[in-house]
Image (cartoon, rainbow, N blue to C red):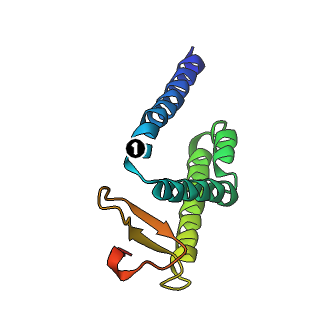
Amino acid sequence: MNSLKQSAYYAIGILMMKGVSLIMIPYITHKLSLAEYGSLEALVLLADIGTILFSFGIVDAMYRYIGTAEGTEKRQLISNCFTLSVIVCIVGASLLVCPSPGWFTCCQSPSKATKFYYCSFQPCSMAQYPFL
């Protein structure tokens, strides 16, 4: 019965996540221009690919090994996964930010109707108020 309850929690979480995404699509497409929405989708795609490439299977390892571990071994596995995740995040962030100031910039959208910030691989004009 316990596994059924946990499966139900997992299913509810997935349904809520997909439901919020489904509800937000009309709102986001109404508020953003075509170019802004394309930039947003490119960033989401980049994040998805980065997650696949740089996660090193940490989530799968957690499901496989931590579920069967007990006591101090379980705490050590969780600690290792967390430490590796933090190191990967720091290295990835430094690779994005450090190469040069104009390489990757985030700018305010040209549309005054939305207060949307986008990131691109091109420098912003100073009129767009770069915030990074």
**Image x and y of residue 76, in percent:** 59, 52
Residue at horizontal 59 percent and vertical 21 percent from the top: 3
Total numbered badges shown on the rendered structure? 1
Residue most extreme to the bottom: 100
The image position of residue 87, as x and y in percent, is: 57, 67
Q: Quadrant of the C terminus?
A: bottom left
Residue kind at label 1, given as amino acid type: His
Above-or-below relation of 62 to 52: above
| Residue 84 versus residue 102 in the image, above or below | above
Residue drawn where x is 66% and y is 60% of the image: 54
Q: Nearer the viewer, residue 34 or 106?
A: 34
**Percent position (x, y) of residue 35?**
49, 59
Counting other residues with Cα less than 10 Å from the Cα at mark 1, is it few (<14), some (14-19), or many (20 or more)? few
Closest to the observer, 40 or 10 = 40
> What residue is drawn where x is 58% and y is 23%?
7
Give whichever of 125, 55 is nearer the camera: 125
Q: Is residue 51 left or right of residue 123?
A: right
Q: Secondary structure at mark 1?
A: helix
Q: Is residue 67 left or right of residue 132?
A: right
- In the rendered image, which quarter contains the N terminus? top right
Residue at the location (44% across, 64% down)? 118
Q: Residue furthest top?
A: 1
**Residue 109 position in % (x across, y down):** 38, 64
Comparing 74 with 2, the one in front is 2
- Residue occupied by mark 1: 30
